[in-house]
Structure formats: C-alpha cells, structure tokens
Image (spheres, coloured by chain):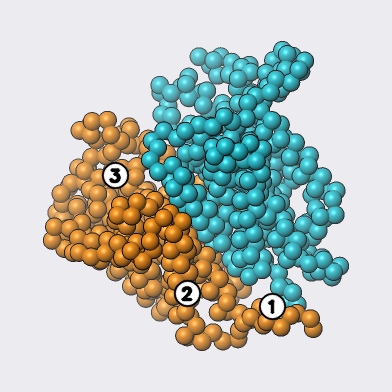
Amino acid sequence: MRLEAREHVPDWLKFLVPISAIVIALIIAALLLIIAGAPPIESFYYLVKGAFGSKNALAETGARATPLILTGLAAGIAFRAKFWNIGAEGQLYAGAIAVTIVGTGAVNLPSSVMIPFLFIIGALAGAAVILPSVILKQFFKVDEVVTTLLMNFIILLFVSFVLEGPLKDPMSLGWPQAASIIDTGILPQIMDRTRLHLGFIISIFVAIVLWIILETTSFGFRIKAVGYNSSAANHSGHSVARTMILVACISGGVAGVAGVTETAGLKGYLTLDLSPGFGYTGIAVAMLAALNPIGIIFSAIFLATIYVGADSMSRAMNVPTYLADVVVAVTVLSVLVSLVLTNYKINFQSASK
Amino acid sequence: MILDFFEILLNTGFWAATIRIACPLIFATLGELICERAGVLNLGIEGIMTVGAMVGWTTVYLGAELSSGVICAALIGAIFGLIHAHFTVYLGASQHVTGIGITLLASSLSYFAFRLILPSSTTPPKIDAFQPIHIPILSDIGFLGPILFQHTAFTYFAFLMVPITMWLINKSPFGLAIKMAGENPMALEAQGINVLTIRALAVMLGSALMAVGGAYLTMSAFNAFYFGMINGRGWIAIALVIFASWRPQQALFGALLFAGLDAYQVRAQQLAGAFIPYQFFLMLPYVLSIFAMIIAAKKTRYPKALLIPFRRGERH
C-alpha cells in the first residue's frame, strides 16, 4: 500500500474532510461514553438539547462560539503563512489586561466611541505580545512555536500578578479579580435576558473582513505565497519578513479581540479563568475549517455546541466534562488524516515495482 | 541581605533539589532529542508527559509495583508515539499540527480517565512513591553525600539515561540509522534500510522517555496527580533540545542549569518575595528558555531533514 499524490482534488472530496472528521470524533466520543457507563444515544440527546434546546441554550452556544471564532481566525491566518502561532491563549489575555487597564474607569467615553476604542486597544495588545516571537523568528531564526507557547505561561503569570496587585478589585474580598468594565464599555446584549452579546456579531464581521483580505487582495495572495514556499516568495520581490510580521500582528490582534469580547462582553471583568483554553481550541477550529475564515464561523459554532452541550450532558449523565476536550483533539487529528487521504490516492497494490 | 542570596548556594538542600528538578527535564529532553534526530519534531511532548504522569500514578494507586508503574508509563508513551508516527511518518501530515493534536488528545484523555477513576476528590490522594536510598558510605560524605547520594532510584535512573542515550545515538547501529534518517534519508534508503520504520521507532522510543519523565513527577516528586501539573515542562524541553544542539551530554547540562535556576528561584522568592511579586520568579524558567534559544540560535544546525516527510520514490 502506498500514497500517490492526486493531481486535482475534486470539490466533493474537500467537503468530505470536515464531515468525516466530525463523524470520527463522535464515534470516539461514543466509545468513551460506553467506557464511562453512559448510553451514547441518550447522552448525545442531552448534548444537543443542552446546546440548542432552549433560547438560553442557543444564546450560550453563540456566546461560547464568539471567542472560538476569533482564536480560530488567529490560528487560521497565521497557519496559512506557516507561522505557527500557538500563543493565542496568551494574546487573548493580553487583550483582556489592556481593556481592563483602560476600561475600568481610566477612560470614560460615550458608548459608541468607548466600545470601538476597547477593541482597538485589545487588538494592539494582542499584536504587541506576538511581536517578540515574529521578530525572533525572522531575524534570529528562533522557532516561533516554542516562543509563542512559552509566552502563554509568562502572560498568564502576569495576569495572576496584576489580579493580586495593581488591577485587583478592592471590593472583591480576596478573590483575584479585576474591577468591572464601566457601563459604557460593556458590549450590549443582542438577545434579551441572555448572555449573547455584540461580540458574536463582531467576530463574524472580523471573519468576513479577513476572508475578503485573503481572497481578493494582493496581500492575501502574498500570505499564501509565503506559506507555500517562503524562498520562492522572496525571489518574486516581496518582502517575506514584512508579510510575516504583518500576518503575525493580525493573528495576535484578532486573538486580543477575543480577550475584549470575553472581558467586556461575557464576564464584565478580568479573572484568571477568563479562557478555559480558547487559544488552543482555536487551532482545532481553524483546522476543521481548512483555514477558511468563513468556514471558521461554522466550525467554531460546532465546537461551541460540543462544549456547551457536554456541560449539560455531563451533569445529566455524570460523565467528566473533559469528554468535550477529547472530541476537539480527535477532530484535529482526523482532519489531518482526511486531508492526507484527499490529497493523495491510496494505491493498494504493494510497492513492489 | 546580599549575602543571603549567596548562602543559598552553600545549602545542600538547594543542590539536591536541583538534581531532583532536573530529572523530568532530562527524560523529556532526551526523548525529544531522539525524535528530532530522526527528523520528527514531536510537539506531543506536553500531552505525552501528562499521560505518563497519570498512567504511572494510577498503576501504583490501583495496587501495582512501582516498577510496573514506570513500565506502563513508558508503554502508553510509546503508544502515543506510534499515533504521532502514524500521522507524521507514514501519512506525512504536518508535524506541527499533529503534535498539538497529540498534546490535546493525550492530556484530555488523561483528565477524562482520572476523573472516571476518582470522580470527586478535592485533595488528590498520594501513593507510596519511590523513597530516597541512602547509598552506604558515599551518602555520609560531607556536603556531597546529601547532594548526590540520597536520592530515589528513579532519580539515578534519569541520570543513567544520559550515557545510555549517548551510546545509543553515537555508538549503536540503530543510532546511526536514526541520525541518517534525520540528515539524509535518501542515503539510508539506498542502503536498504526502511526510513519510515527507523523514524517510527525513534518517535516511539522518544515518546516513551517523555512519558517516563511525566511519571517521575507523580511517582518520585509530588506523589499525586494534579490537573495541569506538567506546566510547560514539555515546551521547556523542546527549547533545551535546541540549546543542547541535539547532543545528549549538553542536554544534561541544560537540564541541570535550568533546574538549578528553578531551585534557586524558589529560595530567592522567600528572601525577596516581600518586594518582588512571586509571579515574576515563576516566570523565570519560561523567560530563560526563550533566552536559551536566542543564545543557541546563532550556532543552531537543525537536523537537515527535520519536518520533511519521507516518501519512497519521491525526490526531495
């Protein structure tokens, strides 16, 4: 048995990639449910009900999808240029720290100015913390995977420091949390009496903007060229370094925006558990969508469904919630297999020639 | 005050702690080094250490011998290594994404299984872990005795792995094949040796070592399993491999250097904690890893075929 490259990948095969990945992930989830002693069909019923069964459930799924769309976009655009940004988690927190600094009273503007201002500040902070990694990669040949990963730990410790020190809410009675974002900075609800907020629409808007940039501008073309072959892109007269730095800043900036939606949208204030690994899940979101910004909206909603649904399923069936993380991980790996199998044909005749 | 910071260096407790903290890093760095020498970047390391920590601990918790715990950890590591190799070596999928996927899978499965075994424990139970062995005569030597000769068998095993890996990489025929698979796979194939098999075996062996490094934490250091207990040690090991220029003896040096700084950081924290917040001390290992990579970057010479999948009959 051997793999042979396909010259042309038919469109129907491309659609098969995410579908087969999801099916494989759900089969493995069913197996784990059986091991945990829970009947899979009934468990899946609770999962779907928990994610879509009521107005509130729908709103929760949308609210959970919001940061995942953004971290998915952060991974998606960077991976297109083969810049391996695994630091969206830290960049998200950088955005959250920045909006906490300016948004808890230091700056007071009318809502229509305050909210855009917070988004810009959050994006700048996210871009700022990715800058060392991309500069070290381009000019010192230091691997960005490790530096972006290590930055996550550094930034999280910094969050812990600011929450116990300079940004600690004096009213929080010992809990390490920051003061609330002032009212004019809070993202308005878009569904009555739920936690679904303006951030959901903004994240979709960001996805559409990035899709337009990638598909229609020469900058979008350069990103692909750099990702495909950076030395060839260099010979064609484009500055690879400039493209790479810009891509990294967009990636970090979008992850920083996720910090804004969570701080000023969902929670209202910064805590150490603001993100339960949204930065890492974003990688799965991006892979499932084959790095396509529009696809990322849907794959984020799918994985948000799994997370929100798994919460209520685990309550009903007494199964550890970590099942949702397993589904996410299996999705990443099965997308990889499906991608290889669609780009290559399997020739079952043994390689005896 | 300044003298207090020097006094830490005269404390046998500091040096003994350095030795202990180095052990998981030694296993993990050697494991990653073997993978990368064969041409495969293994970003599954953080998750494989987690699953090794969980499986080693659980095996003993369920009543097995300590040695069986280490063996089970190594086996589960090798299994995840096989999954990694299946994707990256046989299917030629992206090593970056596969590695992250393996880390997500191995850690989420570990947490899921741990919660199944212990549904609701707020304080994780401890096991009767490896106990320090006082080596006769040697452990009585002043100063050096408590530093070098009063450790657990697991600790001595970690240090023994360094010469074993040196022999494996530099002297054994398998090591030669690993190096060729990472430098010039075409030449290896031309000698009639299957590049894919060599790479897969190297990834499995390396992953087994990573898992044993994780098991050290639950079986010889903390004696319990906590969520998030690997805490970036895997990523630090990846930085250490680069810092060590892919050489086992330098990996030992790097691991000891880092462990020393970590042990020093904990003690300096007690002295300076009043005016420097403790989080900045905890950041040090991560910050230093980045600096170590910057220092090493100038002389870095990656294995030539690292990250490049090998397909028989295709020219590169």
Marker count (numbered): 3
Q: Nearer the viewer, residue B296 or A268?
A: A268
* Residue identified by numbered label 2: A20
Which chain is disc 3 placed on?
A
Binning the other alpha carbons within 10 Å of mark 2 as few (below 14), some (14 to 19) or many (20 upward) gives some
Q: CA distance from mark 2 to mark 3?
A: 38 Å
Disc 2 + disc 3, Cβ < 8 Å: no
Residue B18 percent coordinates (x, y) = 62, 28
Q: CA distance from mark 1 to mark 3?
A: 52 Å
As drawn, is A230 to the left or to the right of A242? right
Residue B14 percent coordinates (x, y) = 60, 22
Q: Quadrant of residue A110?
A: bottom left
Q: Amino acid at mark 1?
A: Arg
Residue B97 appears in the rendering: yes
Indicate which disc residue A2 carries: 1
Q: Quadrant of residue A202?
A: bottom left
Q: Are marks 2 and 3 on the same chain?
A: yes
Q: Colour of chain B?
A: cyan
Q: CA distance from mark 1 to mark 2?
A: 21 Å
Q: Earlier in the sequence, mark 1 or mark 3?
A: 1
Residue found at x 24% / y 53%: A266
Q: Are marks 1 and 3 on the same chain?
A: yes
Q: Quadrant of residue A353?
A: bottom right
* Residue identified by numbered label 3: A270
Q: Amino acid at mark 3?
A: Leu
Q: Amino acid at mark 2?
A: Ser
Q: Colour of chain A?
A: orange
